[in-house]
Image: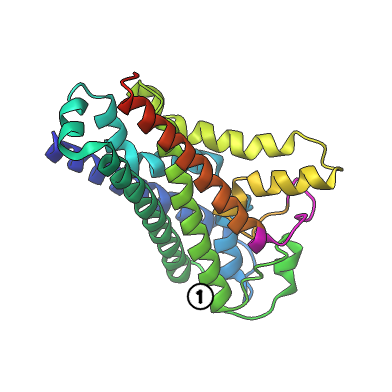
Amino acid sequence: MFKNTKKIILALLVIYFIIITIFTLISIQQVNQLKKGPSTGLTTFLSLQIGGAYNNIILQIIQFILIPLLNSGLFIYLKNNNSFIAIQQRTGYRNFLITGILFSFIGGAIIMLLTYLLQLALITIFCAPIVFYVDPHLADMGIQYFSLNTGLELASSILLSSIGWGIFSILVFSISLFIPKNIICLLTGVLVALILIISPLVGNMQNSIWRIISFIWFLPTIIAPGQMTFNSMAPPINFIFAYFIGIALYISIALLLITSWSKRKQGGYA
């Protein structure tokens, strides 16, 4: 079973990166029809990210589904399998959960890091080189914090985003523990993402307290830090500050859910 599972995960990874390549090349083809400038490489990369001009909703949904699934799907499958009691007796709930958390975080972060590196490579080869210099056009795109005019800013943006995706994967894993059906777990990532993106925008945006709370709760705050305006308005607090509070909030919720699930299982509850 585990050998076949590894083959399935590997196949899904290959399919995922093929999809990333196809969507990136389609966007590059559109950019190549336009007049290019020194910042074309960076703006193209930025436009491929969530909220960007070339970001595709279908690709975003695929990422929300596949990235958590590729990292924690095996553990959720084992949890919902009839053989889980035998696995639990060998490893214990604590080791099972710790391994699931580590796989979710490390896998999510690495997959997104490789995604960004693949996009940068494709842009450099088929579109334009990545050139770092101050360009006011980036500010016109709504980017107020990461202007991406230095290699350090680009690296920081990619690193923080990759970590954010790893934290998001842990949250999806913690929620999936309570879902008994594998088929429903397949959609957990995209459903959680939709809630975390839409729910912060439904309150009173004129209320400064609500805007701060909802910006911290807003999923792009941790997976696309500094790369989006908030409900077409400037973010209410510094994006780095909001990023780390958001990370702490997501981790706290995930740990509460994981602890609750573990206590239920150890108490003999279904």
The image quarter containing residue 144 is bottom right
Question: Would residue 167 be found to the left or right of residue 222 on screen?
Answer: left
Q: Nearer the viewer, residue 166 or 84?
A: 84
Give residue 77's quadrant in the image: top left
Q: Residue furthest front?
A: 267
* Magenta stretch holds residue 233: yes
Picture coordinates of residue 225, whole percent (x, y)? 61, 58
Residue at disc 1, secondary structure: loop
Quadrant into which the C terminus falls: top left
Q: Residue at x 26, y 44 (%)?
A: 95
Q: Position of residue 173 (x, y in %)?
A: 40, 38
Q: Quadrant of residue 180?
A: top left
What span is colored magenta in the figure? 230-241
Q: Quick one: which residue is furthest to the top in this view?
A: 270
Work out whether residue 119 or residue 35 is closer to the camera in this orientation and state it. Answer: 119
Give the x, y percent position of residue 251: 50, 47
Instruction: Specify the principal SS of the magenta part.
Output: loop
Q: Is residue 248 above or below residue 12?
A: below
Give the total number of marks visible in the rendering. Answer: 1
Work out whether 58 lies above or below 264. Answer: below
Pointer 1 residue:
129
Q: Compared to 101, does 76 lie above or below?
A: above
Q: Is residue 54 visible?
A: no
Name the amino acid type tagged 1.
Pro
* Residue at figure coordinates x 58%, y 35% from the top left: 194
Quarter of the N terminus within the rendering: top left
Identify the residue at horizontal 42%, vertical 51% (top origin): 20
| 180 in the magenta segment | no
* Residue 87 position within the rendered picture, expressed as x and y whole percent measured from the top left: 17, 33
Answer whether residue 132 is visible to the viewer in this image: yes
